[in-house]
Image (cartoon, grey):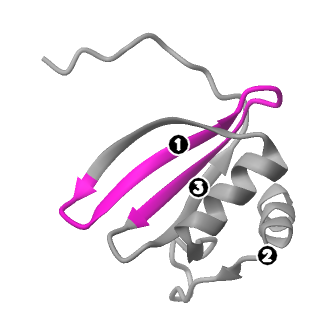
Amino acid sequence: MKRFVLALTLGLVPAAATAGSPTSDVFCDDRARIVEKLETRFGATLAGRGLRGPETFVEFWVAERSGDWTMVQNYTDGRACIVAMGENWESFGPVDPA
């Protein structure tokens, strides 16, 4: 239900996915629009990001008040997709990359 409400609120269109695909709940739009909606409508802030490949990076956006989180995969062409979301985000100390 939360995914449906978020998608309606963001005004995003589901991306094409094959039947039975684990990514059937993916929503894509221009990255700037997704970020603007996450920040203004949900009070989310960027909690972290990492490279997934040469043309993609993943970000986690968190609404501290509610504990809701959103995982956004970004592409070099400016497109972004919400690929997962959930509740009860917990932050930990810095990660030592060594």
Residue depicted at 65% across the width and 36% down the height: 62
Of marks 2 and 3, the one in the foreground: 2
Q: Secondary structure at mark 3?
A: strand
The residues tagged by marks 2 and 1 sit, at their Cα atoms, a distance apart of: 20 Å
Sequence order check: which comes first, mark 2 or mark 3?
2
Q: Which residue is mark 3?
A: 84
Q: Secondary structure at mark 2?
A: loop
Q: Main secondary structure of the magenta part?
A: strand
Q: Residue furthest top?
A: 93
From the viewer's side, name the closer residue of 23 and 12.
Answer: 12
Q: Quadrant of residue 76?
A: bottom left
The residues tagged by marks 2 and 3 sit, at their Cα atoms, a distance apart of: 16 Å
Q: Quadrant of residue 34?
A: bottom right
Q: Which residue is mark 1?
A: 60
The residues tagged by marks 3 and 1 sit, at their Cα atoms, a distance apart of: 9 Å
| Labels 3 and 1 touching (C-beta < 8 A) | no
Q: Which residue is mark 2?
A: 11
For mark 1, does the 10 Å Cα neighbourhood hold few (<14), some (14 to 19), or many (20 or more) residues?
A: some
Quarter of the image where the C terminus is located: top left
Q: Is residue 69 magenta?
A: yes
Question: Callout 2, which amino acid?
Answer: Gly
Left-right relation of 32 to 98? right
Question: Callout 3, which amino acid?
Answer: Ala
